[in-house]
Amino acid sequence: MLVGRNVSSALFFAVMVGCVLWDVFTRFHVFPILVFLVSSLAILEATALVRKTGAEMRPWRLGCWALVMMFVFDGWLGEMQHLHVIVIVGLMLLFVQAMTQPIRGGIGSVGTALMCSVWIGVGFGSILTLWSWDGPQGISREGRYLIVFLMPVAMFQDIAAMWTGSLLGRRKLAPVLSPHKTVEGAIGGLLGSGLMGLVLWFIYSFFKDDTRGVPLCEFFTWWDALLLGLLFGGVGQLGDLSESLLKREAGVKDSGWTGTAHGGVLDVFDSLLFCAPTMALYAWTRGLWMFSG
């Protein structure tokens, strides 16, 4: 199962990175279509899990899907600048929907629906926010290369954590949520993602004269890459454990089925759903990328 999970991780992320690179070199953009599709499957899995946790919590699945689409669409065209508006309007609509249902369980339904929508929508919306950025001068495609940085690093922290844990793991990290995760594995994932960040930055440094927008090293330093890698190593594992919390509450092993060693779509992208917003927040904090003047 360990090898199968590694292969399936690499396969899923290779497909997404390949779509990004296709968008770099062609005018027909397929990556946003893929994100809309994957986010739709993810919110269906998330609401299905919540419904299994208790009979009284019945999040409005159509409403959740609509909210997620709004988040993702805003990430694609609006750089998530309307996030607060979507949350407020969505909360109001969820309350209206809850009022049409039996009173008991209404608060739980509204809360879990908003949680699932923000979790999935902001995660995938942040990915398209990065994808949509056209560089400091607004004429190149650095944002898509940032996706190519984000995904391998997020993937590698999971692989590094699994292999380190299987070889050196002794102390359980969260035995109730995920009995196979260890403290040693978590440290290995943290260091592995930091190392992958440096490797990718080093590769990018060879393309400083490329006119397609690859010269990330001009505004994206090696220590940015290292720090982001370490951040991904931490929040990626937090995302994994967060999904495990929901699955344990629902009493299931996998969030769904994809025909691979991973269970469902959420099992594949749980780390990325935390890593992508972290990258966007880091950009805002540092005044880099799409948030620079």
Image (cartoon, rainbow, N blue to C red):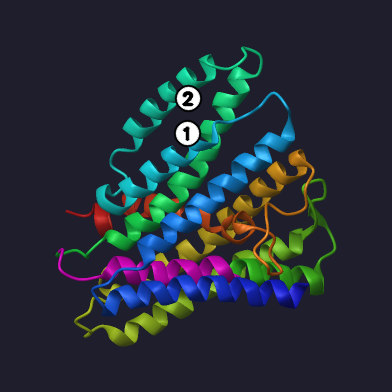
The image position of residue 129, as x and y in percent, is 33, 55
Residue found at x 46% / y 50%: 123
Question: In the image, is residue 98 above or below residue 247?
Answer: above
Q: Is residue 36 visible?
A: yes
Q: Which residue is mark 2?
A: 94
Q: Tell me if 283 is positioned left or right of 245 in this view.
A: left
Residue 237 at x, y percent in the picture = 63, 56
Q: Which picture quadrant has residue 213? A: bottom left
Marks 2 and 1 sit apart, C-alpha to C-alpha, by 7 Å
- Please state if 73 lies on the left or on the right of 255 as rendered: left
Query: Relative to the observer, which residue lies in front, 77 or 167?
Result: 77
Q: Callout 1: 10 Å neighbours few (<14), some, many (20+)?
A: some
Q: Which amino acid type corresponds to the residue marked 1 in the rendered image?
A: Gly
- The extreme right residue here reads 170
SS class of the residue under badge 1?
helix
Q: Residue at x 44, y 78 (%)?
A: 200
Magenta stretch mostly in which secondary structure?
Answer: helix
Q: Which residue is labeled 1 in the image? A: 63
Tell me where residue 268 appears, x and y as whole percent: 61, 61
Residue at horizontal 73 percent and vertical 27 percent from the top: 55
Give the image quarter of residue 5: bottom right
Q: Is residue 149 magenta?
A: yes
Q: Which residues are magenta?
A: 138-156
Q: Is residue 279 visible?
A: no
Is label 2 in a helix, a strand or a loop? Answer: helix
Are discs 2 and 1 less than 8 Å apart at CB?
yes
